[in-house]
Image (spheres, grey):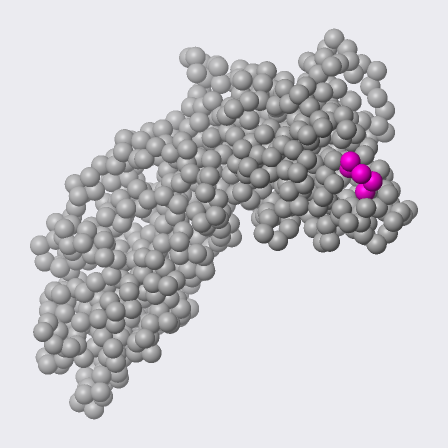
Amino acid sequence: MNQHLSGATSPNLYSDESPVSVGELRKIDAYWRACNYLSLGMLYLSCNPLLREPLQVKHIKERLIGHWGSDPGQSFIRVHLNRIIKKYDLNMIYVAGPGHGAPATLANSYLEGRYSEVYRDMSESEAGMARFFKQFSFPGGIGSHCTPETPGSIHEGGELGYSVSHAFGAAFDNPDLVAVVAIGDGEAETGPLLASLHSTKFLTPARDGAVLPILHLNGYKIANPTILARIEPDELRSLLFGFGWTPFFVEGDNPEVMHREMAATMEECVRRIQAAQHEARTGGAVQRVRWPFVILRTPKGWTAPRQLDGHKLEDFWRAHQIPIPDVATNPEHLKILEDWLRGYRPEELFDREGKLVAELRELAPVGDRRISANPHANGGLLRIPLQLPDFRNYAVPVTSPGASETETTYILGQFLRDVMRANMNNFRVFGPDETASNRLQAIYEVTKKAWLAGYLPEDADGSELSLEGRVMEVLSEHTLEGWAEGYVLTGRHAFFASYEAFFHIVDSMFNQHAKWLEKCKTEVKWRASIPSLNLLVTSTVWRQDHNGFTHQDPGFLDVVTNKSATVTRIYLPPDVNCLLSTADHCLRSVDYVNVIVADKQPHLQYLDMDAAIKHCEKGIGVWSWASNDKGCEPDAVIASAGDIVTMEALAATAILREKFPDLKVRFVNVVDLFKLQPTSAHPHGLSDADFDSLFTKNKPIIFNFHGYAALIHKLSYRRTNHQSMHVHGYKEKGNINTPLGLAIKNQVDRFSLAMDVIDQVPQLQSSGAHVKDWLRGQVVENLAYAEEHGIDKPEIRNWKWTAGAG
């Protein structure tokens, strides 16, 4: 391990052992200086970009916003990546994990010429550079992360912890891709990042690309030291070795020494990657590889002034953001900034027009080999639509609505099995140890679970493990979500299934991905459409017979509706044929996060395939077979969204029609939840006229909803007859309950719904007193039975739809 913390120059810098010549090293250093100059210019300058005149206050941005700390280290990495890309003709992307390090990525994109290709007004000229500087962290410009506007980026980085999982997602099924990921040492303190370091146990050198992590140890976060920078080097080495990596250390602050050592280290990493892949692809054993992992230790804010007003600046947390914040009001500090900028010698780096000089332009790769232009970082360019089997072939016969039961997700698993069979290079299924638990086990007939860790003989007895598996299971929802996002961002198709209560674990990851999609879809027109990210929410709140209260939380849907409806959809198919139609639609879609809610337990089936397709195409509609209001205005509308709550709503309808033969009830089912939003908020929403026609004005609407009731009110509050809507949903009540018992505690059961109709329909408020009393008795009786027998009464468990029979 090398430690050049004193800055001493190594006498062997230009020895024959160096993989680069003296001239190459000097060019590399000059290119790096150009990157640092541009990064610093973005933080400070609004004009005079090449310092063709003395620096004055009028050249400085009035608000100084941005981050310097990791920029020099990241540009140092990028310069060396360019060298090995050109030498080995590598297909490489770069994932910037340190968050606020966008100036480095932007500077490299600009020097590679890609930024000017995408944004013609920011040409490679003095005027273009001025505009390039001014836009950074400026109103109407771009942020300090690698946002979707940044060419070559698939990773926003505003929320830390996901860089490694995104890189692995990109590498799966991309055999010639090298995904280099810079890990911030602050980021390395997050749980998601640490969990993602296990990803090597799921990446095969025979079929997948490679991931090369570079842990950038610059020692500090915003105002604190970082843990991994302060532990003993041997402890850090052991930590990474324990995660399954081969650590390589490059450490110091002397640029000459560091360039040489980084060049040698990158050569060794590439050789090891290529050797492992060659062995696995030419008949050698396919096994887990201890892939190289680089630890790059450089000063925080490298190349900044060592001190400022007696305070340490370079190699300390004060270099994290704007290193010299008061240059507009402190002439001495303005002079220090000018000396700092001129210290990079911009007159040697840029020609008279303001373009990088020719001998330095030669260092960057060309065309699609440029990191900023790699098509994998604009994955829609590589998107191949899935070859989908006809979902109609998996239809469950429904001769009479509500008369038979089927395990809904089990049938879905058969469909996904054949989707996998037809798309063995660009489709994967993700889930946290729950693929079989969620009844999707038919997929194992085509492919097993990816597993490159150790094997035991007993694993052959049902563990479904394989070195070539395409089902991705690890007990880290963060890692799975990151893998799936990286996979779709690079143009492939992902299906992620998990328990409902624990989708909350990836709330913020979903948020970041949805924001990325919205920006791409509505503003960044040069980004091509990517496959949608498809999430199956199952093992739902209403069937937690043994898990109880901890597993009862449908609130992920609320999180989804907080994001733009232009990139999010929520589907609640009531039965298997609707689920199949929905899944087919979602797998064909682009630029969405599709959330499908479907429980894994047996449920009543209502619609044959033709009816299901029509119902799903509409997204919301009347079930005529459950309604008796044809030719007249209904006395009440009973609506539902979700599988179990639909059955309870139908049972309530049957009770009411038996007890009150003259009562006119319309039954409405909702599949696409966003249909409830007004068209002004969502282009796919139901028009106000259609909404008013469906949910009759001035008539009570009893809405039985899968999730929290407030969500339906939120989506429909602008509707003219919203005041007539009475929503039943989960109320945080219950624990270890039977299905009906849990429904009763939350008042989504048939008896509670029927009582609410009696309360809301004027003609029943007096005449329905005896029925309401009977309904209250049913609640007491059924709860008592469940507590004594541990199961619902047979007439509840075996209930089927028969019009007029409660």
From the top left corner, tell me how far across and down residue 229 is, in percent.
Answer: 73, 38
Quarter of the rendering containing residue 733: bottom left
Q: Residue, x 17% and y 43% (percent of image)?
A: 392
Name the side, left or right, on which 452 lies relative to 778.
right
Q: Number of callouts in the render?
A: 0
Q: Residue, x 37% and y 72% (percent of image)?
A: 717
From the top left corner, tell me how far across and down residue 136 is, in percent.
Answer: 64, 46
719 to 531, vertically: above or below: below
Residue 557 visible? The answer is yes
Which image quarter is the N terminus in?
A: top right
Which image quarter is the C terminus in?
A: bottom left
Name the side, left or right, on which 506 lies relative to 353.
left
Q: Residue furthest bottom?
A: 766
What main secondary structure does the magenta stretch of the protein show?
loop
Q: Which segment is the magenta one?
A: 51-55
Q: Residue furthest top?
A: 16
From the top left corner, tell me how far across and down residue 552 is, in percent.
Answer: 40, 61
Q: Residue furthest right?
A: 310
Of 653 and 109, the residue lying toward us: 109
Q: Is residue 603 magenta?
A: no
Quarter of the rendering containing residue 558: bottom left
250 to 410, vertically: above or below: above
Q: Residue, x 66% and y 38% (percent of image)?
A: 127
Residue 229 visible? The answer is no
Of 199 and 170, the residue lying toward us: 170
From the top left corner, tell me how far across and down residue 96 is, in percent.
Answer: 60, 37
Name the side, left or right, on which 633 lies relative to 364.
left
480 to 552, vertically: above or below: above
Quarter of the rendering containing residue 799: bottom left
Q: Is residue 53 magenta?
A: yes
